[in-house]
Amino acid sequence: MTSTSNIADGCAAPDQSAPIPAGVDLEKETVITGIVSTADGDAVGGAYVRLLDSTGEFTAEVVSSAEGVFRFFAAPGSWTLRALSRQGNGDISVDVTRGVNEVSLAVAAS
Amino acid sequence: MSRDTALVPADWAEKNLETPGVVFVEVDEDTTAYDGGHIPGAIKIDWKKDLQDPVRRDFVNQEQFSALLSERGISNDDTVVLYGGNNNWFAAYAYWYFKLYGHGDVKLLDGGRKKWELEARPYSKDVPNRPATQYQAAAPDSSIRAFRDEVVQAIGAKNLVDVRSPDEFAGRLLAPAHLPQEQSQRAGHIPTAINVPWSKAANEDGTFKSDDELAKLYSEAGLDNGKDTIAYCRIGERSSHTWFVLKELLGQPNVKNYDGSWTEYGSLIGVPIALGDEPGEA
């Protein structure tokens, strides 16, 4: 399941980001952060979240926190996020810019 | 070496959790994962605290490695099964150490923590109490470790395999995308290196691809089987993963891991650097 327009927008979105480490310059960094959740909206902790570049090549992988939160330091452009979990898998394509980009990533059993 | 001796599937591991003489070792950069649950009976090794020298910029020497394994209760004749997070990067790095210091029987758990977790296999929070041993590490085997001068001389002469992501190879990123990017060294890659990201050798569940797929991957990328090979990445752990593939799974004779990798090379004064997606000229 791939969709392309799910970047959480502006102040209407809940705050999904865990604290960003001190010393990270958000003027320079392109942060992609968000929550892995099921179709019912339950957060999925322990999911393996993979960041794939615009050609589909693997770039990085993190494990979501107990609250389902994940975060990448990327670069402006197009990326795909893919999550693997015991509750199922899911992916989403995003276009990001410098600063913090919030994304919702849903998983479902296939 | 081959897949049969170097790699064990999760089913084998689960059946051998209590087999005498088999020691499971979790190796990670972030050992809080171990503390939250690990393969029953497994001990932990901290990639930074246990495997790096606290003062010099180098990894632990023969005496330090002997002392570490003695204290953790590992014997020279134990079968050591290594696994970890990050698709077994740090477990592969530790595997390379065990080989470097002459351990007889060491294996990687295929898929590491990820496959184990996704398949909901058992975890425990109990920390085993293994009596101390008298482990004797062998002198380091320099045939599997490359140093910087050798790497500079290998430009245009040996296979250089850069296993970082395409963006790191080209110089668009300086570190994997789950880490902050600020770094002091230059970006790019060693001229004439081919870029075969470590991830191309693994399936998305963390297991290694088949021998046929792996052989095809490197031959299509331009690896010359008639030449010696040096693998590198940013700090030497992802390249251990590729070293494991080339040396232990595909059985290539002369493969070295350059653990200084890009953090060293990209900080050297006067060495050539190539930018962009192509290997570049010698």
Image (spheres, grey):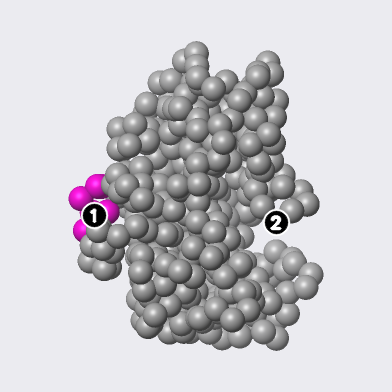
- The picture places residue A62, in percent across and down from the top left corner, at 55, 58
The amino acid pointed to by label 2 is Arg
In the rendered structure, which segment of residues is drawn in magenta?
B210-217
Quarter occupied by residue B193: bottom left
Q: Residues within 10 Å of mark 1 (few under 14, many from 20)?
A: some
Seen at 62% across and 23% down, the residue is B135
Identified at 50% across, 46% down, the residue is: B142
**B111 falls in the magenta region:** no
Picture quadrant where residue B62 is located: top right
* Horizontal side, residue B163 vs residue A70: left or right: left
Numbered disc 2: secondary structure: loop
What's the magenta bit mostly, secondary-structure-wise?
Answer: helix
The answer to which of B123 and B47 lies nearer the viewer is: B47
The residue nearer to you, when weighing B158 against A79, is B158
Q: Are marks 2 and 1 in contact (CB under 8 Å)?
A: no
Q: Give the residue drawn at x 59%, y 81%.
A: B270
Task: Judge left or right: residue A1 versus residue B138.
Answer: left
Task: Report helix, strand or loop for mark 1.
Answer: helix
Q: Separation of disc 2 and disc 1 at Cα?
A: 34 Å
* Residue closer to the observer: A94 or B255: B255
Picture coordinates of residue B101, whole percent (x, y): 54, 36
| Side of B56 where B169 appears, left or right | left
Q: Amino acid at mark 1?
A: Ala
Residue matched to label 2: B57
Residue B61, can we see it?
Answer: yes
Judge depth for marks 2 and 1 and give the one in front.
2
Residue assigned mark 1: B215
Counting from the top left corner in percent of width and height, residue B36 is at 65, 38
For the point 43% across and 33% down, the residue is B107
